[in-house]
Image (cartoon, rainbow, N blue to C red):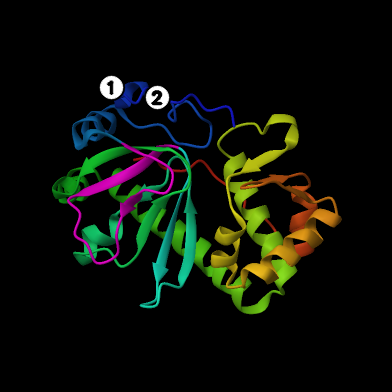
Amino acid sequence: MNLVLPSTGRRVPCEQCPLRGLPAFRDFTEPELKFVSSFKRGELVAETGSAILSEGNHSPHLYTVLSGWAFRFKTLPDGRRQILNYLLPGDLLGLQGSVLGEMEHSVEALTPVILCVFQRDKLNELFEAHAGLGFDVTWLAAREERMLDEHLLSVGRRTAVERAAYLLAFLHNRAATLGPVTDKVLHVPLTQQHVADTLGLSIVHTNKTLRKLAEKDLIRWLDRSCEIIDPEGLQELADWDAPREITRPLI
């Protein structure tokens, strides 16, 4: 992905945010930009595998992914994990904790991640003084609900091969909205364990399933990642039509 990464040693002003120039995101009005700039407290750098938010904890912050990939998940008492969704640049984290008081899921960095940090106690001011930004936060929550609906349908009704095809087509579609994919091949930083924990399959079943996709020349599985070669073929196999992405909000 051709996305300019900010320096980890300094604060990136909202006025110079590298995401604002991407066509996927709507622009702020001047009053909105001024508020969001005051709302932001700095950046947080998370290394691969580190916890960003933990289930059951209280966090005084909201976050927007500035660069990198992360994922949301829940665990059972015995440690079994269900990955709920993946987080890419522009996605908002921590809203659930802001509304409900504590997090009911966890978030882990899938790659090195840089996050914009926002003070949660200014969220009321956002809704009271900036109706457009309040709508944006609601829109982001509704979009997340739409994605979770699709994931639940896939896990509940698609075959193992169809589930895997859907997941990789979904991730390709999400990433492609952020910029051009080099040579039309997208590198997805997943391990087979991540795929298994997303699809509700054993690691052995997952390995066999991904091998079938590779044999169809839809993907190329590497050691700890996947190259998506034929996203249209994955969509056709999953019988899934990617949603038409409109210009979306950025907080």
Residue type marked 2: Pro
Which label was assigned to residue 250?
Answer: none
Location of the C terminus (image quadrant): top left
Q: Please give the range of residues in magenta.
A: 45-67
* Residue under the image location 34 percent in, 52 percent down: 51
Q: Name the residue tied to disc 1.
A: 10
Looking at the rendering, in which quadrant would you find the N terminus? top right
Left or right of 188 in this view: 62 = left
Counting other residues with Cα less than 10 Å from the Cα at mark 1, is it few (<14), some (14-19), or many (20 or more)?
few
Q: Residue at x 62, y 72 (%)?
A: 202
Please tell me which residue lies in front, 67 or 124. Answer: 67
Question: Which residue position is annotated with label 2?
Answer: 6
Asked if 153 appears above or below 138 in the picture, the reply is below
Residue 75 seen anywhere in this rendered image of the structure: yes
Identify the residue at horizontal 31%, vertical 24% (top origin): 12
Image x and y of residue 97, in percent: 25, 60
Query: Would you say residue 239 is visible in this rendering?
Result: no
Q: Is residue 148 above or below residue 71?
A: below
Q: Quadrant of residue 77?
A: bottom left
Tag 2 secondary structure: loop
Quarter of the figure with residue 105: bottom left
Depicted 11 relative to depicted 115: above or below: above
Question: In the drawing, does residue 31 fall left or right of residue 84?
Answer: left
Confirm whether the magenta stretch covers residue 62: yes
Left or right of residue 97: residue 176: right
